[in-house]
């Protein structure tokens, strides 16, 4: 066990990030199990503890008698300083064992700007950052999560990637490792990696060679042996009612980002927004039965004592039994003071009556995501909502007593003009005017949050060249100049962080050199504005001779081999090409769940059917 003196904890903010012993945490004797698995989130405790995927894996792994799963999060900068000065290795929260003592360290990659934290955590653990420098006694390093749909920038640091939904593959992964250990570890690490490579959804980057054209584009991704799969397909859960859920999650002692029950209604989304990677990689829609959700909710309330249930999914308002579910949840838990919340609302499926229901116990502001300021641009991105949808929904909300509205937008989208950017300010002003028209007085507050579009792999916009930083900043200034009403608040993201996200989102494995250089020069917690060091990154690109604009700003051709083409989400590339063409012609593709099949290929390709209980 790693010694952690009170003197050290007195020197850091929020010591409870490092003490463990939270309610529902599981501590096992490492000698009594075969596989010791460290579940790692490369971000601070409050963020990592809010991740639903890790909660689910933690419960699945610890339900096994042969496995112990423990947690580790990125130490905040004050704790890292104490650890390096005191020679304290990175440790898990449950048993305070060094992470280097585990069989597997599995990172969840949610966001490209967390990559340097992975390197930093490995270094703090005393584990060589580069996979090729690790010896047979050191852990296998694995990565999963949405970023794994293009993991190439992390290839140098990772032994294996898990593509798709973890519930499907985590048990098989542990069984392979357990069997390998029982047999005396034949073939060493290479032996177990070969065994793992036989599983569907497991990608071993060292088993592939990548070659490049003279202009820098990828020319070939080639398996190094005949038994290695040329294409890795994602794993997908076919029956959401049949898999384990995190019904006994750990309850923290300090406030975390999502400090409430997270009840997942369904996976997937078929709305088809052309910018949305999650909408592609989690296809098809698979709903849980209402009875299952009510049972999970009861267990979660009993096991945690939380007084709020958040109904989470990519678009929770699309759950086909939502109204019945909310009524049932309110009936069951209202007397206990347990409130229900819907974190995401779609304008077209929004119901004021529904919003009033869920806020009977606790009322909060309303958030909508028009994404774009003009109808033309909403058609380009296939948002599928109209100007009238928004004003009707907001008007109904004002009539029902709401006066505060948040609106989310993006700029930098394909085909965007200044008129589209101006449309954001115009729409916000229309909302303000609508309140005055309905209420006969001023008093509304509208908050606009504007992010910068980042083209993501496996989406119809994966070929689009991202707007340069200077162009995004010009559009931000334009937007600011058009907002005259002091009751409209404008927030936007730093264009430089979006640029870096764009570089690594569509990058290849040569970017590993940049990551390594930037981390050595002090980059970490890049997603946190107070720690983001853009100059360090630019120096790393110069030092490694790599041009970041080649990755972020270059429009790619449809026949170019993309760095992630050997990894399949199940959606056909021909569908993505077709959808990009639809975007350029400003044509809308209907939701295949409620209309005609758009022939994306995911259902026949993966052999999985959409599940919609159709309670509407």
Image (spheres, helix red, strand yellow):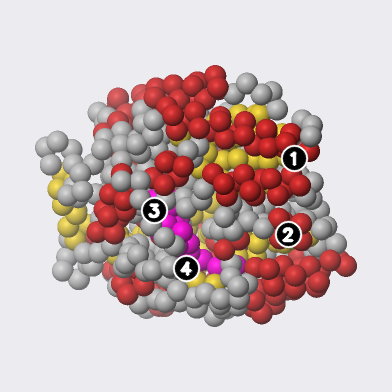
Q: Residues within 10 Å of mark 2 (few under 14, many from 20)?
A: few
In this rendering, the answer to whether 234 lies above or below 275 is below
Residue 594: image tag? 4
Q: Could one spot residue 307 in this view of the protein?
A: no
Q: Which of marks 1 and 4 is nearer the N terminus?
A: 1
- Name the quadrant containing residue 265: bottom right
Q: Is residue 201 left or right of residue 361?
A: left
Separation of marks 2 and 3 at Cα, in angstroms: 29 Å
In this rendering, the answer to whether 223 lies above or below 507 is below
Residue depth check, mark 3 versus mark 1: number of the one nearer the observer: 1
Residue 353: image tag? 2
Q: Which of marks 2 and 3 is nearer the N terminus?
A: 2
Q: Residues within 10 Å of mark 3 (few under 14, many from 20)?
A: some
Magenta stretch prevailing secondary structure: loop
Residue 438: image tag? 1
Q: Position of residue 616 (x, y in %)?
A: 60, 73
The residue nearer to you, when weighing 605 against 187, is: 605
Q: Could one spot residue 324 in this view of the protein?
A: yes
Q: Earlier in the sequence, mark 4 or mark 3?
A: 3
In this rendering, the answer to whether 13 lies above or below 476 is below
Separation of marks 1 and 4 at Cα, in angstroms: 34 Å
């Amino acid at each position: 066990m790693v010694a952690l003196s009170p003197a050290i904890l007195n020197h850091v903010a929020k010591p409870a990030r490092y003490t463990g012993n939270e309610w529902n945490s599981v501590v096992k004797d490492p000698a009594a199990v075969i596989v010791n698995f460290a579940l790692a989130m490369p971000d601070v405790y409050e963020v990592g503890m809010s991740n639903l995927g890790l909660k689910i894996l933690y419960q699945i792994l610890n339900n096994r008698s042969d496995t112990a799963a423990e947690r580790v999060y990125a130490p905040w900068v004050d704790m890292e300083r104490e650890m390096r000065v005191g020679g304290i290795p990175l440790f898990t929260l449950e048993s305070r064992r060094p992470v280097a003592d585990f069989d597997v360290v599995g990172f969840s990659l949610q966001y490209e700007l967390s990559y340097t934290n992975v390197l930093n955590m490995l270094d703090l653990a005393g584990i060589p950052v580069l996979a090729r420098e690790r010896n047979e006694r050191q852990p296998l390093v694995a990565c999963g999560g949405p970023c794994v749909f293009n993991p190439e920038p992390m290839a140098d640091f990772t032994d294996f990637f898990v593509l798709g939904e973890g519930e499907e593959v985590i048990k098989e992964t542990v069984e392979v490792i357990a069997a390998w250990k029982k047999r005396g570890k034949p073939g060493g690490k290479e032996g177990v990696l070969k065994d793992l490579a036989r599983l569907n959804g497991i990608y071993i980057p060292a088993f592939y060679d990548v070659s490049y054209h003279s202009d820098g584009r990828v020319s070939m991704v080639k398996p190094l042996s005949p038994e290695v799969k040329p294409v890795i397909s994602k794993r997908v859960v076919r029956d959401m009612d049949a898999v384990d859920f995190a019904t006994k999650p750990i309850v923290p002692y300090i406030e975390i980002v999502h400090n409430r029950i997270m009840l997942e209604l369904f996976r997937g989304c078929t709305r088809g927004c052309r910018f949305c990677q999650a909408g592609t990689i989690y296809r098809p829609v698979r709903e849980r039965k209402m009875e299952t959700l009510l049972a999970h909710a009861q267990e979660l309330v009993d096991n945690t004592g939380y007084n709020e249930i958040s109904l989470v999914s990519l678009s929770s308002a699309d759950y086909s039994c939502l109204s019945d579910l909310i009524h049932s949840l309110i009936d069951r838990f209202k007397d206990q003071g347990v409130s229900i919340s819907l974190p995401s609302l779609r304008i077209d499926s929004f119901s004021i009556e529904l919003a009033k229901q869920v806020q009977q116990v606790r009322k909060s502001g309303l958030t909508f995501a028009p994404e774009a300021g003009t109808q033309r641009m909403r058609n380009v991105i296939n948002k599928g909502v109209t100007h009238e949808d928004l004003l009707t929904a907001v008007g109904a909300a004002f009539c029902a007593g709401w006066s505060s509205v948040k609106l989310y937008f993006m700029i930098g989208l394909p085909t965007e003009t200044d008129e589209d950017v101006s449309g954001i300010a115009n729409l916000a002003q229309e909302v303000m005017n609508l309140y005055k028209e309905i209420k006969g007085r001023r008093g509304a507050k509208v908050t606009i949050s504007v992010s910068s579009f980042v083209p993501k792999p496996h989406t119809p916009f994966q070929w689009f060249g991202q707007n340069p930083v200077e162009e995004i900043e010009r559009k931000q200034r334009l937007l600011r100049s058009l907002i005259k009403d002091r009751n409209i608040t404008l927030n936007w993201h730093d264009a430089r962080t979006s640029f870096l996200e764009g570089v690594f989102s569509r990058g290849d494995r040569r970017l590993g050199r940049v990551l390594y250089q930037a981390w050595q020069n002090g980059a970490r917690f890049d997603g946190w504005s107070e720690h983001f060091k853009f100059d360090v990154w630019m120096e790393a690109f110069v030092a490694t001779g790599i041009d970041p604009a080649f990755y972020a700003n270059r429009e790619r051709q449809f026949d170019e081999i993309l760095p992630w083409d050997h990894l399949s989400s199940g959606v056909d590339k021909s569908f993505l090409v077709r959808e990009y063409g639809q975007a350029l012609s400003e044509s809308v593709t209907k939701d295949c769940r409620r209309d005609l099949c758009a022939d994306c290929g995911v259902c026949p390709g993966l052999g999985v059917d959409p599940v919609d209980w159709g309670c509407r």
